Amino acid sequence: MMRRLICAAATLSALAATPALAEVKSATPGGFQVGGAVAIEAPPARVWAVLTAPDDWWSRDHRWFRNSTLSLDLAPGGCWCETAVDGRVSRHLETALVEPGSKLVLRGGLGPLQGQGASGGLTFDLKAEGRGSVLTWSYIVGGYTPGGLENWATPVDGVLSAQLANLKTRVETAD
C-alpha cells in the first residue's frame, strides 16, 4: 500500500512539473496515435469550461485563417469550426460524444489532415486529481496520404501538445 502511495505521489509530481506529457504512441503508413496527459491546477469544471471554448486557447499560429474565431458546438454532430472575418469557414472536427465535465470525443482531420484521405478521433478525458485536474488526450488517425501517415505523427503531436500547454496556461492564469 505504501509503495502504491509513493508511486502515485511520484507520478503526480512528474505531471505537475511538466506542462504536458505527450508522445507518439504508434506510427505506420496507415495511421498513427499520439497522446498524453497534462496536470492542471484547477478543478475539472474550470478546465471543462476552457476546453470547450477553443478560441480561448488554440493558437492563432495553427489556424487556417489569420483573423478567425473557433467555436465548438457540443451537440452530437456539432462543429469545431473556424470562421474568418470575411466569412470563410473551416470545419475541423465534429462532436461525437460529450459527457459534460469529464469526456469529449471529436472526429475529423485537424489542419492539413483535412486535405488528406485521413480522419481520426480526438478524445479528452478529464479527472479530478487532488486539488486540480488531469486532462488525458489521445488522437488516433487512420487513412491514406501519399508517403504515409507516419510522417504526420510527430508534427501533429507537437501541435496538440503546444495547444494543451496553452490550455493549461489559460486555465491557471485566468481571473
Image (cartoon, grey):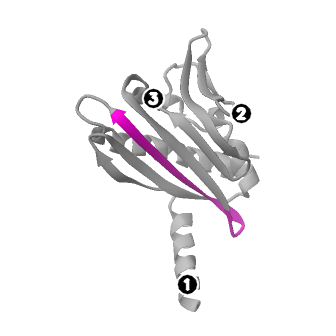
Mark 1 Cα within 10 Å, few/some/many (few <14, many 20+)? few
What residue does disc 2 label? 75
> Which residue is at the front of the view, 66 or 37?
37
Whole-percent x, y for residue 111 in the image: 45, 29
Horizontal side of residue 72 vs 140, given as left or right? right
> Which residue is at the front of the view, 61 or 91?
91
> Which residue is at the front of the view, 146 or 135?
146
Q: Which residue corresponds to the image point at 68% horizontal and 39% vertical from the top-left?
A: 52
Q: Nearer the viewer, mark 1 or mark 2?
A: 2
Secondary structure mostly seen in the magenta stretch: strand
Gap in angstroms between the C-alphas marked 1 and 3: 41 Å
Write the start and end of the magenta stretch as one range. 128-143
Q: Nearer the viewer, mark 2 or mark 3?
A: 2
Circle 1 SS class: helix
Circle 3 SS class: helix
What residue does disc 1 label? 4
Whole-percent x, y for residue 135 in the image: 60, 55
Question: Residue type at mark 2?
Answer: Ala
Gap in angstroms between the C-alphas marked 2 and 3: 22 Å
Q: Which residue corresponds to the image point at 48% horizontal and 31% vertical from the top-left?
A: 62
Does the rendering let one see residue 20?
Answer: no
Question: Residue type at mark 3?
Answer: Gly
Horizontal side of residue 92 vs 134, given as left or right? left
